[in-house]
Image (cartoon, coloured by chain):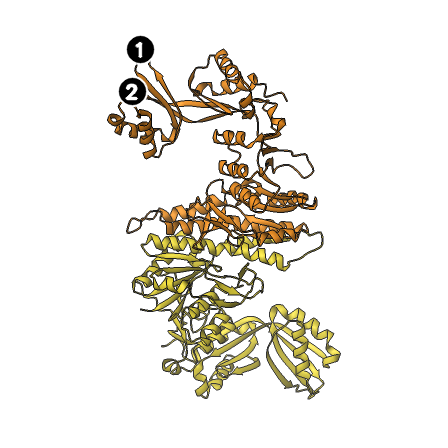
Chain colours: A yellow, B orange
Amino acid sequence: MARIVMKFGGTSVADLERIRHVAALVEDEATAGNEVAVVVSAMSGETNRLVGLVDALEADIAPDGEKRTSAIEDEYDSIVASGEQVTSGLLAIALRRRGLKARSWLGWQIPLRTDMAHSKARIAEIESSAIGPSLEGGNVAVVAGFQGVNERGRISTLGRGGSDTSAVALAVALKADRCDIYTDVDGIYTTDPRIVKDARRLNRVAFEEMLELASLGAKVLQTRSVELAMNNNLPIRVLTSMRDVGVPNPGTLVCHEDETMEERVVSGVAYSRDEAQITLLRLKDRPGMVAKVCRAMAEANVIVDMIVQGISKSDSAANLTFTVGKRDLEKALAALEAAQDEIGFEGVKSDGEVTKVSIVGIGMRSHTGVAQTMFEALAEKNINVEVIATSEIKISVLIDAEYTELAVRALHSAFGLATT
Amino acid sequence: MARIVMKFGGTSVADLERIRHVAALVEDEATAGNEVAVVVSAMSGETNRLVGLVDALEADIAPDGEKRTSAIEDEYDSIVASGEQVTSGLLAIALRRRGLKARSWLGWQIPLRTDMAHSKARIAEIESSAIGPSLEGGNVAVVAGFQGVNERGRISTLGRGGSDTSAVALAVALKADRCDIYTDVDGIYTTDPRIVKDARRLNRVAFEEMLELASLGAKVLQTRSVELAMNNNLPIRVLTSMRDVGVPNPGTLVCHEDETMEERVVSGVAYSRDEAQITLLRLKDRPGMVAKVCRAMAEANVIVDMIVQGISKSDSAANLTFTVGKRDLEKALAALEAAQDEIGFEGVKSDGEVTKVSIVGIGMRSHTGVAQTMFEALAEKNINVEVIATSEIKISVLIDAEYTELAVRALHSAFGLATT
């Protein structure tokens, strides 16, 4: 017997038919003798409907010009949280209709306590003294995801991807053996199957790999939920909710690295099109110059990712190239212009048409020659590399966006990811 | 400065435009220097949508044939209560947008404690220690109607008309000066304006009169809310939410009787088409015979209203005539058939095509000749009276349903109700 937390997102509970199907999946785990807590999102479309109502009222002009204050955020959270309230009740009924004992739990009923941040609250504490004994008594706990209660007794919401984090945090608090994240894909793939037809589902991925893959644009799991699971050694399984009960659905297990994983060197090829490249030309090579650039970006709330310093071939002056999020490009350029004298550079070039392509694998720690294989594969296709960044388990390159698919296919093939 | 509770039903908050209008009405009271708590229903149609989702799942057949158990009622209440949760948040935002301080209060946040009855819970206690100081601090309290929290910490709902009762109970707990019930009519009328064109809005109605009028089918206020107000000497004002701010909107004040009221003898003419008449023929005139009939009806869960014993002209045997709710007629007849030997009667006649018409007025206590005026008016129109029932402030007659409008108009005219 195990204790399991199952999480279902909005498309998995989109209508009564899907909710009935989720009840069947839950029953399958419960009748196998497991203690089961289920975390649900709002029915898809419902959160948008509720946010739309709030937005329409917020568009009204207040006499004092009041914008979104914390008082309005309190109401926003209370309104939006009603979506998960409905789903949790409906799933509890559907489970009862299958003959299971089940009840819904709202954030304030558990209670799941959060800090005071609005619409993106962080979980402070999950009380297990009520829900734990309920599970031990054979009840399925159906938990409204995405919501908690703050120290003023108001409903708070956890922000985007919050239901994943609810589920993992609940699993940690309940000392669950596993957290199963049901979604609309059947696992984590070696790369994007829309680009590489023979991309392969991975049976296991290490937490560290998943963090790199998630932050690189493989948006199956929210980064915070993976960190939380890693820190608490809680295995996460990613699998599809679209498969019938009884049909094999192994998904991908995200867990601490084990021997199986180390046999492979590279686990996946990720890419992100949300990048932009900025090059500062002919920098005065003064101490602390890079720090000044970073400070200017931080003050403008722009996150700097890859960063490389080079020597211009023509005049031996130093250039500095770095990447920012594509939607931050204008803001970054404005901040650099304002700080030009302070930083000390002569010109700036930028390019929004770039892609970051990365290979990720914990096996890279103990294997040499990985970088060589990567650059040979890219060179063979005449793909020019603008910037390189590496970590212990990842190598990322910035390339012209036109070459994205070509590069991903070349790397997927070069590391033999299609074969098992 | 007064403390006021304002209540708005589903049609008054049907969409964002109506919610903005309600905010204007609330602002009008608040800027006049009053402390204001507002009780809101769900946006019209929303409760039905939510109930529809629950009903669809409940139609699924459980393996153990489980019907609506208390566990499912818990979920029903939690799901349905989300409707008021949304409206209370939206109105709080709309008030903020008008520059007022406002916050929403859910049942569990007040808390408004109820007993354990499902979907028709009764209010056990309303805590005023949080909401009271909030009002004193100049905040408008926007309270989600219809909902509370029970002793197991689950959301409970108060059943049909529950928002009226929420509002009155809240007003009592907050020691409010008045409870204003906003609805889609502009007050209590001397009779149904659809039948009598010159029916007149009453400025004041006594609690006792309102109770008789409400139970007789003038369904503006829920009976429980009137009883609660009467027992706590809390004036209720019934007025329309459809009028613009600044346009006179006196409504009808429901309060303890005063001298103004005693000047009139009859306040209104009410009617109810939901009646059915049953006559037991040639009863054996044994002691306790009426009690036996009443017991048979009580065991069948049928409420007996008017009851009269008469002598048949033909054979001097006793007949017993009484009325039940029209939708209970079949059930009542089946119960009587089963108990025929026990009660001891020879035959039964029934008629579902009857109407109860009543005149109501606290002035009747101290005036004679009211009954005479009533029966003369009916006789003049050749309306046959089947059964008569009287109380201190009411005379009801049962007539053939075809004569309903004729009787209502004749009585409205006979008591001079159209003139002020």
- Position of residue B173 in the picture relative to residue A85 (left or right): right
Look at 50% across and 71% down and name the residue there. A224
Q: Residues within 10 Å of mark 1 (few under 14, many from 20)?
A: few
The numbered mark 2 sits on a residue in which chain? B
Give the x, y percent position of residue B292.
30, 28
* Left or right, B125 with reference to B324: right
- Per the rendering, the mark at residue B314 is 1
Q: What kind of residue is marked 2?
A: Asp
Disc 2 from disc 1: Cα separation: 16 Å
Q: Position of residue B17 (x, y in %)?
A: 61, 44
Q: Say which mark, if any, is on residue B285.
A: 2
Q: Quadrant of residue B240?
A: top right
Q: Point out which mark residue A33 bears.
A: none
Confirm whether residue B331 shows in the render.
Answer: no
**At 26% across and 29% down in the image, what residue appears?**
B338
Q: Please say whether residue B140 is visible from this viewpoint.
A: yes
Q: Residue at x 44, y 87 (%)?
A: A366
Depth check, front residue: A396 or A413: A396
Mark 2 or mark 1, which has the lower sequence index? 2
Q: Quadrant of the N terminus of chain B?
A: top right
SS of the residue at dot 2? loop
Q: Is residue B137 above or below residue A334?
A: above
Instruction: Judge left or right: residue B185 versus residue B48.
Output: right
